[in-house]
Image (cartoon, rainbow, N blue to C red):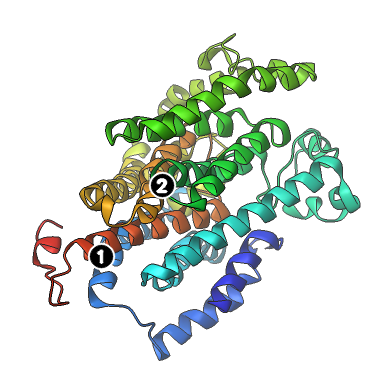
Amino acid sequence: MFMFYLIILLAFYMPTLPIPGLATFWITDVFLAFVFIWRFVSPPRMTIEYRHYMYSTLMLPMYVFALWLGLITILTLSATPDAGLVSTGFSYLGRLRPILFLWLMIPYCSERQQLYKMFRFLMILFILQCLVVFCQKFNIAGINNWYTPRFRITDVFVREAYLTGRRTIGSIGNPNSVGTFMSLMAMLGYSVYVFGKSYRRWIGLVSAVAALIVCIFFATTRQGTLAIILGCIVLSVIAFFLGKFGRLTFALLMVLLASPLLMYYLAQDYDLFERFALLRGEVGITDVGSMKSRLQLWPEFFREYGLWVFIGKGIAGFYAAITWDSGWLMLIVGGGIPLAMFYLWWLVRIARACFRALPYREMDPVLTGFMLAGPATSFVVLITNIVNNTYAMTKISIWIGMFYILSLAAAFHLQCAAFDLPDGEEDMTNFYGDD
């Protein structure tokens, strides 16, 4: 798995190189191309059942997504006169990069023991991201002078806030995107805590708390903080119906005890205290200036694009458009309402596949903790794209993909264990009969 670890680490922690007028070059592209070629020369070892399950559940919506986006890009290229054919082509290939990462990562969870390695690797990526954020906050080793500026910060006022450590961007390049990164890690951590067992439970709980602290005190992202709170509520409701009362009671006790402490530290910084008035119940979501202004963009968007919302303007139109501060709206810009529906289909399809494996959760409680991170991830991506654009963030797309591969692989292995026959053979007829 060395090449896999190397590619992912480079993708998250090495700055990219923008090529003017063409595309953005990633160092990982070289290794990705090498692995892509090698996969055809020496295909990875996977069972037929695992390959079918992962590719039909995870990749099929993405293939449809890519084909539709490519078709619309070709048909509507003339609608954006300033867009060059070469630059549009490179931009389209850039949109395919997360799909190639998905294709690359699938074999690394084909065996049950590999899931634990994937979980540990996700924890390592999370710890490294927290380390970068911590160093940016306090400008340790001058990181804000030599590392942070490499992430293409263009807004002068925003740049000043990042470089002084008032808001951290990690290696993702944007505080709200760091919030998405952290909220997804919190979903995995809290899911492992509620549904898992042994020491991994406490690792999961600690990572969820750490992710919340980063969102509030480091990235100061309301979107990420709210996503963590709502996502944990969704997982708690699922746990309640599955009878996990003891762990929920402990989590609720922690919230009750920690809330006064959290409010005390928030009050030490007036700006921070006012920024998180939402947490204190002082204002509603629509009273928050940035969220209100972004929600108000929706009717304006539909008025401006008119009938274009049904087909979109392709990749050229996507990059020529103003920023609408919503992943769903930007998806509609690129491929119309159908493209947004394909993406929604992907989110719902994966969540549904994970829920369908719930009857087999007692086969391995640890895998259940991994598996239910999938539906929580779908929920977080669904709500964060309302006021943020995770679709256009390749690093976030890769992060989402890793969570989905872990969750779907856990669902697959749970169902395989349930269909094992006493003689050691596997009856997969019923397993695929309802697919």
Residue position marked by numbered label 2 in the rendering = 373
Callout 2 amino acid: Ala
* Up/down of 58 relative to 267, above or below: below
Give the spatial CA distance, label 1 vs label 2: 18 Å
Badge 1 vs badge 2, beta-carbon distance below 8 Å: no
Task: Give coordinates of residue 148: x percent, y percent.
Answer: 79, 50
> Relative to residue 131, is residue 164 drawn left or right?
right
> Relative to residue 274, is residue 107 drawn left or right?
left
Task: Give coordinates of residue 347: x percent, y percent.
Answer: 34, 46
- In the picture, the disc for residue 53 is 1
Residue located at (53% from left, 49% from top): 392
Task: Identify the mark nearer the N-term, 1 or 2.
Answer: 1
Which image quadrant is residue 84 in?
bottom right
Task: Give coordinates of residue 17: x percent, y percent.
Answer: 71, 64
Q: Residues within 10 Å of mark 2 (few under 14, many from 20)?
A: many
Along the viewing direction, whichever of 380 and 333 lies nearer the viewer: 380
Residue located at (40% from left, 41% from top): 376
Along the viewing direction, whichever of 18 and 165 lies nearer the viewer: 165
* Up/down of 20 relative to 377, above or below: below
Callout 1 amino acid: Tyr
Mark 1 lies on a secondary structure that is helix
Residue located at (49% from left, 23% from top): 295
